[in-house]
Image (cartoon, helix red, strand yellow):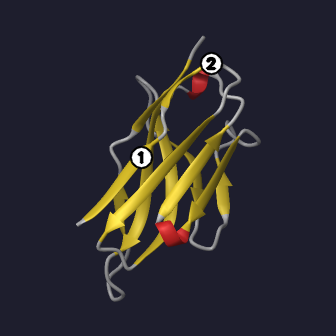
Amino acid sequence: QVQVVESGGGLVQPGGSLRLSCAASGSIFSIDAMTWYRQAPGKQRELVASITSGGSTNYANSVKGRFTISRDNAKNTVYLQMNSLKPEDTAVYYCNAQIKRRFELPASAYWGRGTQVTVSS
């Protein structure tokens, strides 16, 4: 079994900061890319930021310069530092991890249940 669990969401005022965490646990051989997505009410899920096992990163244009993704491979954990938050950042944030459970198997996508981020005064 593999679990992916997000934490760190909450209510923050515009201009504020939050740090999200996502930890993968269970029967894990290795983790390839780890990605944060978000879904606002009435909108499709969108990619926010991703990071490879080697540390290469990719960001949505809407968050570049404000959000920073990082990971701790020893802890199977990815972080999303969110600064200068805007009301339009309000969404449920989901973590996706590409996990290999055994050396000979291809990586499969595992999702967390999401954490709510609300930016409002």
Q: In the picture shown, does residue 91 fall above or below 24? A: above
Which mark, by number, is residue 13? 2
Residue, disc 1: 6
The residue located at (67%, 26%) in the rendering is 16
Residue sitting at the far bottom: 104
101 or 74: nearer the viewer: 74
Q: Residues within 10 Å of mark 1 (few under 14, many from 20)?
A: many
Query: Hey, what amino acid is under mark 2?
Result: Gln
Where's residue 20, x and y in %?
53, 43
Q: Is residue 96 above or below residue 31?
A: above
User: Which residue is at a point 41% across and 23% down the rendered structure image?
Assistant: 42
Say whether residue 91 is left or right of residue 18.
Answer: left
Q: Is residue 42 left or right of residue 63?
A: left
In terms of secondary structure, where does tag 1 sit? strand
Q: Residue 27, position in %: x, y? A: 29, 73
Percent of width and height locating residue 111: 35, 53
Give the residue drawn at x 39%, y 61%: 24
Say if 104 sits above or below 95 in the image: below
